[in-house]
Image (cartoon, rainbow, N blue to C red):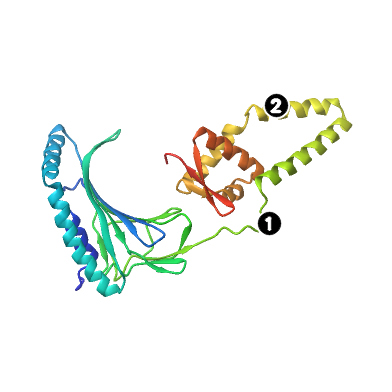
Amino acid sequence: MKNKISIIVILLLLVSVPSIKSQDSEDTTHIIIYEDGSAFWELETRFELKSEVDRTFFQDYIDVLEEEKDVMIEEKKTEIEDIINKLNLTTKRSMTIENLNLSYGIVETINKDYGVVKFQFLWHGFAEKDGDKLLIGDVFLGGYYLNKNETMIIDFPQNFIYEYVYPLPDETKISNLIWYGPKSFGEKEPTLILSRFEVKNTETKSSTEEIEEDKEKDYLFIILIFIIGILFIAILTAKIRKKEDGGDIFFDEDIIVNLLKKNGGKCLQNKIVEETGFSKSKISQVLNDMERKGVISKKKIGRNNLIILNEF
């Protein structure tokens, strides 16, 4: 049993709202880290609505929250600021909070319906900046604890990678780490060191250069085919037409979609080339087609692209 109560646990108790928690409730603490060291916190509780009685009860609960919303937010703001001020003295860093918001509603899914309550706020100075690094953990005085059915998610910027994390997360994706309860963290845990990275361009060719090289190879190949004979020209023409008509494009797209899903919906373009074994020009062509169809989005990182699977 810990002698020191986590200051973050106290904070979470402060931002909690009068609840109808049951064994069917699910709590998620979602922390989104920004490059300047600030963090957007979203504390969500979901209650499964198994019947019309549950739905009616939760709607009455929402009505009560709506009447007390402004007063509740103001009270919580004052209480949280007291905690933040204590952290300022302990960490010797400047921290503030703003944009507190309480929201609620009913979410309908295919299998289940949920009553959802969210408390959100922006925490300036949450992470300590050290050059191109972000250090996270000194605010977790006394550690942290996840109960059963509780989840913690930490998202970080896409142009950062984690150099160190402890304890190890239960699930790791390209730009977020996930822990599931029940789990007990030690003093100043979870601890996370993020480092900004730049994609190095070692002999990386532009898309235009790749296309021009492919064209030259095609011309030489066509000349060779003419020398061999008309028959081979006919065969080559048929293959080219089949490719232009998209004969294999859907199969190629499926491979890339599956690879993106395997990597949490995001992957660098050069990694897609390595994983699929396709040429750079082919990957570029297929990704352009997928982007036009709205299947993926591209985000420029240095000379490389981060490919993001839409609606993942």
On screen, residue 8 versus residue 209, left or right, reads: left
Q: How many residues crowd mark 2 within 10 Å: few (<14), some (14–19), many (20+)?
A: few
Q: Amino acid at mark 1?
A: Glu
Residue 162, quarter of picture: bottom left
Seen at 14% across and 52% down, the residue is: 72
Q: Which mark is residue 241?
A: 2
- Closer to the N terminus: mark 1 or mark 2? 1
Count the marks.
2
Q: Position of residue 137 (x, y in %)?
A: 33, 67
Instruction: Work out whether residue 55 can be spotted.
Output: yes
Q: Which mark is residue 88?
A: none
Q: Which mark is residue 203?
A: 1
In the rendered image of this protein, does residue 267 appear above or below residue 50? below
Q: Position of residue 134 (x, y in %)?
A: 41, 65
Q: Quadrant of the N terminus?
A: bottom left
Label 2 sits on a secondary structure element that is: helix
Q: Nearer the viewer, mark 1 or mark 2?
A: 1
